[in-house]
Image (cartoon, rainbow, N blue to C red):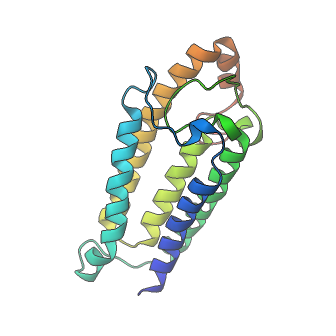
Amino acid sequence: MKSFYIISYSLFLLFFVIEIFTRQGKNSKDMDKTKYDKGSTSVLSVTMAITIILFLLTPLLNFYKIGDFYSAWIIVIGAILGTVGLVTRYMSYRALGAYYTRTLKRADNHKLVMNGIYKYVRHAGYLSNILIFIGIGMTLCNFITLGFVILIYPSVYIYRINVEEKMLIDIFGNEYMTYRKKSKKLIPFIY
C-alpha cells in the first residue's frame, strides 16, 4: 500500500469516529425530514455515498493509471486541510451540542448557537466537511476523485446552506438576521 493512502484513510476513519462519538441529543441521529429540508438531506446523503464509493475505488483507479498523479506538496496540503476540517468538525459538534441535527428541523427549546466557532462562521459543520473531503481527495492523488470533491462538495453545501438559512430566519427571525451581519456564512472573515 502506498504511504499516502494511510493518510487518506486515517482522515476518513477519524471523520467517522468524530461522527459516531461526538453527537449528542435525540435529534443527532434522526433522519426524519421536515418542511424545511427541501431535499437537501437526500442530496447530501447521495453525495456522501458516491464519495465513499469513489474513495474506496481510487486505489484501483490509480493502479490502472486512470487519473493518477503524485505530488508530495498536494498530499501535505490535503493532510493539513483534512486535519483542519476534523478539528473544525469537532469544535462545531461541541458548540452545537444537543442542537446538532442531521436534517433541517426545529429542536425542542431550540436556541441559536452563536458562540465558539459559530461566532465567526455560521455553517462550521459544513465547512468542516468540505475541508475534510477535499483534503482526502488531495491525499488520494487522483484527478477524478479530487475533481469530484472540489466541484460537488461546495455546490451541494451551498445549496444546503441556502435552504438552512431560510429555516433559521423562519425560526429565529431578527435574532438570526442580526447574527448574519456579525458572522460569515462559510469562510471565517471572508464569506
**Furthest residue in direction front, as rendered:** 26
Residue 191, compared with residue 110, is above or below; it is below
Of residues 95 and 20, the one nearer the viewer is 20
| Residue at x-position 67% and y-position 12% | 174
Of residues 30 and 139, which is closer to you in this image? 30
Q: Place residue 117 in its image quadrant.
A: top right
Report x, y in % for residue 78: 52, 67
- In the picture, the quarter occupied by the C terminus is top right
Quarter-of-image position of residue 160: top left
Residue projecting furthest to the bottom:
1
* Tally of numbered discs: 0
**In the rendered image, the vertical position of residue 107 relative to residue 74, given as above or below:** above
The x, y position of residue 102, in whole percent, is: 51, 39
Residue beneath the point at 41% across and 37% down: 41
Q: Position of residue 63 (x, y in %)?
A: 27, 82
Report the side of 142 relative to 160 (left or right): left
Which residue: 29% across, 63% down?
144
Query: With 36 as the anchor, is 17 left or right in this view?
Result: right
Q: Quadrant of the N terminus?
A: bottom left
Q: Is residue 15 visible?
A: yes
Q: Judge whether residue 191 can be spotted in this image.
A: no
